[in-house]
Image: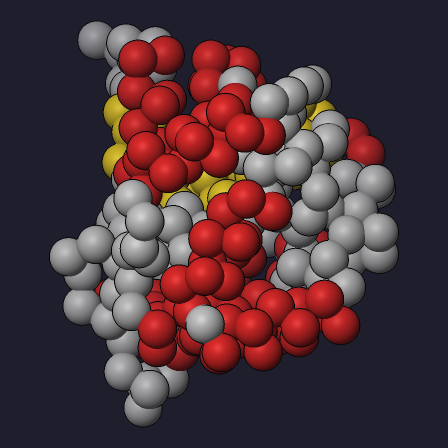
Amino acid sequence: MSTALRLTLLPGWGVDSRIWQSLAPHWPADTAITTPDWPGYGDTRALTESDNPIPMLANTMADQLTADSVWVGWSLGGLLATALTAHLPAPRGLILLSASARFCTPGGVTPDALSDFTRAFERSPTATWRHFLRWQTRGEPSPNAAFHALNTLLGSTPPADTATLRAGLGWLSTLDNRARLAALPCPVVRLAGENDPLLGKQLGEQLGESQAERLTNAGHCPMVSQPAALVDALHRLAADMTTRPAETP
């Protein structure tokens, strides 16, 4: 009996596991999918401000981020998944979906733009969150349809409280995984929409072009604009990772 290909899908800032629902009809039968929420999203307990952020996050997520799975981290989820490899056993592979070694990159989101967004969030969290949903759909073939899909999935209010969202913005500002990505003891691939408005043009930055792949006719949210194509790419990349010989840093 063949063993199921296991993938763990990790959402990004301001979004919970409902973001993956549109992929469900497209997964091959040999695939086992888990979609955990980050602490503070959905029904999960939020981390407290006194918690040591990344080690506490690792402790909280340890039962869900297992070594027998390929981790797929979308946007902030990719940053966090990479950082957590310092505290958890390495996965079978890591797919950075619409993510890089840092959130702010040349040609993508600038530090000034992120600072402006953070100040706007402090003034009006819900309005700023909704602006972000619309902003990240700009690279999709039909931005209005993609925004409507996000609205349908997530509703009109954020799926986490203000403190949790604020902590996420702090991670977007400070996490830098360049050194860690260079030394990961597992395969790592970067997958991004060719029209992603949040990323720079150099999708292979830090990983090399041989480890970067582009999704055509997609932006930052391919799960709502190109679900079948995204599943095909994730399944293929994960299958390749699980058949490679073990790597050493």
Identify the colour scheme used: secondary structure
Residue closer to the observer: 92 or 166: 166
In this view, the residue farthest toward the bottom is 50
Left or right: 236 in relation to 88: right
Which residue is drawn at the image coordinates 43% and 31% (left, top)?
148
Looking at the image, is 69 positioned above or below residue 43? Answer: above
Residue at x 50% of width, y 47% of height: 133
Residue 45 placement (x, y as % from top left): 18, 68
In the rendered image, which quarter is residue 4 located in? top left
- Residue at 31%, 55% in the rendered image: 157
> Along the horizontal axis of the image, is 234 left or right of 191?
left
Tell me if residue 173 can be seen.
yes
113 or 8: nearer the eye?
A: 113
Image-quadrant location for residue 70:
top left
Please indicate, yes or no, whether residue 87 appears anywhere in the rendered image.
Answer: no
Front one among 191 and 240 = 191
Give me the residue at 61% from left, 68% from top: 117
Quick check: 32 above or below 40? above
How many marks do you count on the picture? 0
- Residue 13 x %, y %: 46, 56
Residue 55, percent from left and from top: 38, 75
Give the vertical position of 184 relative to 22 (above or below): below
Point out residue 155 in the picture as x, y percentages from the top left corner: 29, 44
Image quarter hosting the N terminus? top left
Q: Is residue 72 above or below residue 89?
A: above
Farthest left residue?
A: 43
